[in-house]
């Protein structure tokens, strides 16, 4: 098949055929399984034996140390929010009204190196959240909305109407999509 004789070294055959050496392939599969289990919150590390693969993985691939944004499935049978996107005409003609008890504004942004999120509540609270170097703008936008909704000032307002305004159409569409039944 490869034109090699039976005395050809295995390493040379692996290079000719394009196959990774067995120890490299086994390590690659072990690291992939470790990363998959970590992202699914199923990895249990005892810091000995085969669980040391996680430390090798984080040393060789630093991005693997980040928390994953995989969200475990959670069934919520009643959504107590709605997503409204005013039309361009409403914005141009200044017909967007916010008659809610509390109005908040959120934003996520990224420059060449760093990402951040923030939210501002008209009751006078302004929070900035640094998110490091590996976060996307969409993740920052969603995180700002989440942290605004989870803030102590809003969590105890059970009967109040709260408006959280964002400039991210992608975040609004993601939130609206989660309202639809599967």
Image (cartoon, rainbow, N blue to C red):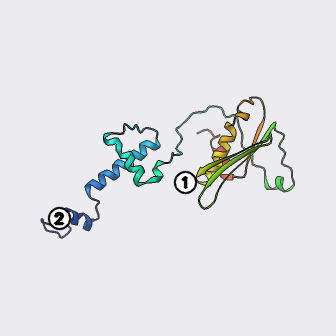
Instruction: Provide the secondary structure element on which disc 1 rests.
Output: loop
Query: From this viewpoint, which residue is outermost toward the bottom?
Result: 3
The numbered mark, 2 or 1, whose residue comes first in the sequence reads 2
- Residue 61: image x %, image y %? 43, 54
In this rendering, position of residue 139 left or right of residue 125: left
The quarter in which the N terminus is drawn is bottom left
In this rendering, position of residue 126 left or right of residue 133: right
The quarter in which the C terminus is drawn is top right
Q: Nearer the viewer, residue 32 or 117?
A: 117
- Residue 16: image x %, image y %? 25, 68
User: Residue drawn 34% across and 50% down?
Assistant: 29
Circle 2 is placed at which residue position?
9
- Residue 103: image x %, image y %? 79, 41
User: Residue drawn 26% across and 55% down?
Assistant: 22
User: Residue drawn 66% across and 41% down?
Assistant: 147
Rendered position, 34 above or below 78: below
Q: Quadrant of residue 15?
A: bottom left
């Amino acid at each position: 098949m490869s034109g090699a004789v039976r005395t050809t070294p295995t390493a040379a055959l692996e290079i000719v055929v394009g196959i990774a050496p067995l120890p490299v392939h086994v390590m690659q599969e072990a690291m992939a399984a470790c990363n998959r289990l970590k992202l699914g919150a199923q990895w249990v590390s005892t810091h000995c034996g085969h669980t040391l693969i996680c430390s090798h993985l984080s040393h060789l691939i630093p991005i693997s140390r980040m928390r994953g944004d995989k969200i475990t499935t959670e069934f919520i049978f009643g959504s107590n929010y709605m997503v409204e996107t005013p039309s361009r005409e409403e914005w141009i003609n200044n017909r967007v009204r916010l008659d809610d008890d509390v109005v908040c504004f959120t934003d996520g942004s990224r420059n060449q190196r760093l990402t951040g999120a923030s939210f501002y509540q008209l009751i006078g609270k302004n929070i900035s959240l640094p998110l490091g170097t590996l976060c996307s703008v969409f993740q920052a936008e969603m995180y700002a909305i989440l942290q605004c909704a989870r803030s102590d000032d809003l969590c105890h307002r059970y009967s109040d109407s709260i408006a959280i305004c964002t400039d991210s159409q992608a975040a609004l569409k993601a939130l609206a999509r989660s309202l639809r039944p599967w």
